[in-house]
Image: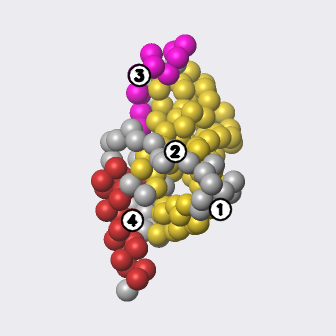
Amino acid sequence: MITFRLIALFCLGLSACRGTGMTGPEQLAYTAVAKIISESPTRLQLTGTIRNNGPESFTVHTGACSVGYRLYSHSASMAEGSLAYEFKPFDRPCILIALSKTLKPGEEYVMTSGPVELSGQVAPGKYQLRVTLYHDGIVAEVPAGEFDIR
């Protein structure tokens, strides 16, 4: 019964945050890394990290489908790039597993996705990738580098 309630609360949190550009509490820091698995087609392994930089413990609630990404057309700055493609993990079927992790000050929680294939999602060219991490009704978007998509 408790597990069902956690899953239901997690799903409500995800649906409430769709399409937002929010970031988490000030005590949390986000980083992302995209590792190239293959260049043609372009496939990546995405990893996002949530770090508790605050003085007190913080519990993070996520799920099995909590890592997405956005591709922006290449430009000198992100402010000038336009969104070319967005992948929201909860827009596809996935197992609803509620996960929680209490982070003590200085601890990190790592979330992974992939491999993801970018070829075929947009026209070949140079793009900036931003990883999106979904937790507790929050969407954190983190830069993960530029990639040539073939």
Left or right: where 13 falls relative to 37: left
Which residues fall within the magenta stretch? 75-87
Kind of residue at badge 2: Glu
Of the numbered discs 3 and 4, the one sitting upstream in the chain is 4
Residue at image position (52%, 68%) is 99
Q: CA distance from mark 1 to mark 2?
A: 15 Å
Kind of residue at badge 1: Lys
Of the numbered discs 1 and 2, the one sitting upstream in the chain is 2
Of the numbered discs 2 and 3, the one sitting upstream in the chain is 2
Q: Is residue 24 placed above or below 122 in the rendered structure?
A: below
Q: CA distance from mark 2 to mark 4?
A: 21 Å
Left or right: where 117 falls relative to 87: right
Determine contact: label 1, label 2, CB under 8 Å: no
SS category of the residue bearing label 1: loop
SS category of the residue bearing label 3: loop
Query: In which quadrant will I find the N terminus?
Result: bottom left
Residue at far front of view: 55
Residue under pointer 1 = 104
Residue under pointer 3 = 82
Q: Position of residue 27 (x, y in %)?
A: 56, 48
Residue at image position (33%, 42%) is 19
Q: Nearer the viewer, mark 1 or mark 4?
A: 1
SS category of the residue bearing label 2: loop
Residue under pointer 2 = 26
Q: Nearer the viewer, mark 3 or mark 1?
A: 1
Q: Is residue 104 placed above or below 81 in the rendered structure?
A: below
Q: Position of residue 39 (x, y in %)?
A: 66, 33
